[in-house]
Amino acid sequence: MFDVIGDIHGHADALKALLEKLGHREGAESWRHPGRTAVFVGDFVDRGPGIAETLSIVRRMVESGAAMAVLGNHEINALAFATERDDCPGEYCRSHSERNCAIHAATLSQLSQEERDSALEWFRTLPVALDLGGVRVVHACWDDAAIQRLAAVISREGGALTPRAVRDLHRKGTPEFDAMELVLKGPEVKLPDGVVLADTEGHPRRRIRARWFAPPREWSYSSLVFPPSPLVPAIEIPAPQRPRLPYYAESAPPLFFGHYWMPAESTPSLLAPNLACLDWSIARGGKLVAYAWNGERVLDPAKLIWVRHASADPTRPRPARTMPA
């Protein structure tokens, strides 16, 4: 049986607390549960204060057989950030723009060059999705054709995301690039001209993440954005700009994914009887969430298990006030 764990983003203390809550214990080799396997949905790096420890915990669990993990968009971004383009020497598959450097800054500052190189070599070995028979795991979006296309690229390279594979996946306008974007980052829709939103780092965004797993109530930006946001206008999306969304059948096996920054202040819940997003914004002061799956085809919200970010934990001791409030 599987404990599927959401986006960690370097919050090692929350990860250890969640593993403890799920019944995993730290041993000489790694954290381990006597009868369960952890499955991580990706996004181990960037943003949090304990990136090195997070990588150590997850990697040791995977390499000892106590866990499995899929690649997140922050892992593929890290590989692309470190991979030079073959058509433009000195440039990288993920540009070293101010925004991209800011997103990756915590990882660059917390890991030595040797640690970064080791982490990148491990990222190369991670699958983009897991179909475990009765349950599926992906970072952002499940699409059979796109997953098969990515698997073909990786298989061609002997089962690893080699530098050549990373370059192939970052050639814009190719089916491989589109597949990588869909599976690891999810479908997005361009906002109307003149409409600009801020991303999680405060940088301007002109695209929204789409609710890909079910048909929208109507083809408007506010109906399509996921998670829902009052900032997105209720303007109809022109037919030529409507994305092809894969949807996820009600009859399909349970699917767990992350990526989407569910509201930090909300109580974790299911999206559908066979769908759960496990990213509840630990990096924004929210929760690190897992689902304890025991083989059921219909998911049970009572099996969502979480720990709060330390700053949001009401049981955490607060400093004494030295002046009246």
Image (cartoon, grey):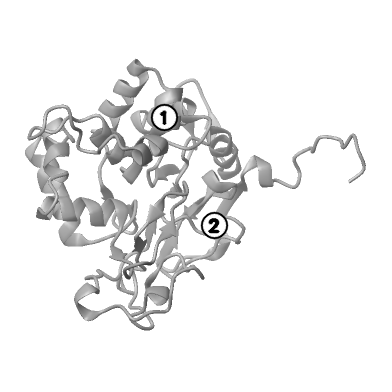
Which residue is depicted at the point 87% across and 37% down?
321
User: As displayed, is residue 180 above or below residue 166?
Assistant: below
Residue 18, picture quadrant: top right
Residue 308, percent across and down? 63, 47
Which residue is depicted at the point 29% across and 34% down?
96
In the foreground, 113 or 310:
113
Q: Does residue 131 show up?
A: no
Frontmost of labels 1 and 2 is: 1
Say what amino acid the circle numbered 2 marks.
Leu
Which residue is depicted at the point 27% across and 38% down?
126
Q: Mark 2 points at which residue?
A: 304
| Residue sitting farthest toward the right | 324
Which residue is depicted at the point 42% across and 56% down?
260
Residue 324, percent across and down? 92, 43
Say what amino acid the circle numbered 1 marks.
Thr
User: As displayed, is residue 254 above or below residue 162?
Assistant: below
Q: Does residue 21 show up?
A: yes
Q: Mark 1 points at which residue?
A: 107
Q: What element carries label 2?
A: strand
User: As displayed, is residue 228 above or below residue 95?
Assistant: below
> Is residue 138 toward the left or the right of residue 243 in the image?
right
Residue 111, percent across and down? 41, 22
